[in-house]
Image (cartoon, grey):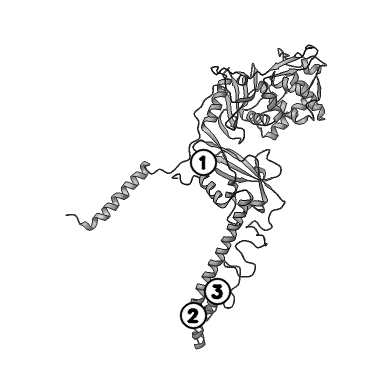
Amino acid sequence: MRSKGKRPKTRMAAFGMCLALALQGGMFSSYARPAWPADTWIEGDAGIVVDMDTGAVLFGRNIHQPYAPASITKLLTALVAVEHVSSLDEMVTFSYDAVYNVESGSSNPISVEEGDQLSVRDCLYALLLRSSNQAANALAEHVAGQAGVEGGRDGFVAMMNEKLQELGCKESHFANPSGLNDEQQYVSAYDMALIGCAAFGNETIMEIEGSLRYDLPPTYHNPQGLTVYQEHKMLITSDSAATEYYPAAVAGKTGFTSIALNTLVTCAEKDGRRLVAVILKSNKTHYTDSINLFNFGFDHFQNLDTTGDELTLFGEEGTLTIGDRTYRREDLEVIGSRLVTVPLEASLGDVERELVTGEDMAVGHPEEAVAEIRYTYDERVIGRCYLKALAPGGLAGDGEGGADETGTREGSASDGEGVEGGADPAEGSSAGIGARIGSLFSGLKEGGPLPIAGMAAIGLGILAVCIAVPLWVRHVRRQREELEAQRRARRRQRLAQIGYTEEEFKKVVEERYGKGKGR
């Protein structure tokens, strides 16, 4: 007969075995962040879709390989031109070289002749809507001359390549402003997405790119003027049954050469989100490929607002050390996009953040930025913003915490009543009494006699310690409570400066970091 006394141990052992098996079998699996979606495909050799507001790469194929760009080059040509002219009404004169120095078989869609004049605005419409190589050449010559750059068209090409560096493009190079074939003219899908985001972020280019038609003034061969029309089928197709139909498309540029095949850059906007898709070396699948990328990006991802999230980088004292300077929250301003792109099921609690400074900050960061807040998800950069100092310097000191409004560091005392070291044991304090008792007992350790007066002193010392220790503990507790109250007050002040109450901020943190989701 089994002993009843052993039954509890047996039950506990059985429970332990069941628990171990359950854990191994995943019955109590820990929460894992949602996987980054990848269920889409393109037929073109290379392609990418990025979120224009965060820079997050949502999907890519061969995005760092070089390809011939064809006429999508004209997006960079337009961007450099717009940034270097003083007025869109400046008149551009077409030289013989601008009209005739083009690839054999290249057309002249706006029928310009040597000596014709069009405004910069006219040339931009002819460039982007009708993909005129002559307009590209004439703009290049004009802009280089206005900027005082030697070399005419070649000087403008040098400006294009300088712009690449400014945008952070490291895998591309341009040899002409039109996109005609050249061994030194190549671009990666990733770099073209950076160019596209910059171009579509320019108001002038977006106004032109979103147009369906434009009337050019009279020229030598067109005394009545000429109307140019948008060629990008995703922008002009309204038949919902057509394979090129995509109502969210708002801007874009087409390209084609015998080497590049079909290339396409498109911007689409839906539900407040803007995506840019690039397709390179496609054999007539560039429109369907772009639509697949846009549907994937809009259907599987969301943008979250990180406003207030920067407070998580600050220490308990409400300060943040950047380099050799320490700042309070009110000393810093957040600039740049506050958005991050994550899968639909994810929250801010799934996002990792890192403070990046100096040369490690992203290329093209604002000059006034003292640090970059970089957000990542599964090692993908999904957004970034920057911290700008509102006043030079920051707080004085060695970076180990900041000073409060009175100039005293939090957690320390300027009057000699510190509670965590820094003050010598004083006469009458518990530490001082303990030191005196220790000196009396040192005589016994050395074999010396303990005088009666010493014994009395020990008794009085013990009594004093019994009285002093509780008082000292209460004093320490009171000091800590006061310091905590001061920190809370400063925290409320900082939150008020950015428009939050303490309760509202707590609620935002709980919502964003997934508390209550069973993690």
Gap in angstroms between the C-alphas marked 1 and 3: 51 Å
SS class, disc 2: helix
Q: Residues within 10 Å of mark 2 (few under 14, many from 20)?
A: few
One can see residue 318 in this view: no
Identity of the residue drawn at 81% across and 12% down: 220
> In this view, which residue lies farthest toward the bottom?
452
Give coordinates of residue 151: x percent, y percent. 80, 26
Identity of the residue drawn at 66% across and 58% down: 398
The residue type indicated by label 3 comes to Ala
- Which numbered disc covers residue 431? 3
SS class, disc 1: loop
Q: Earlier in the sequence, mark 3 or mark 2?
A: 3
- Locate residue 516 relative to residue 154 in the image: left or right: left
Give coordinates of residue 207: x percent, y percent. 69, 26
The residue type indicated by label 1 comes to Ser
- Locate residue 459 relative to residue 159 in the image: left or right: left
Q: Which residue is mark 1?
A: 347
Identity of the residue drawn at 64% across and 57% down: 402
- Which numbered disc covers residue 463? 2
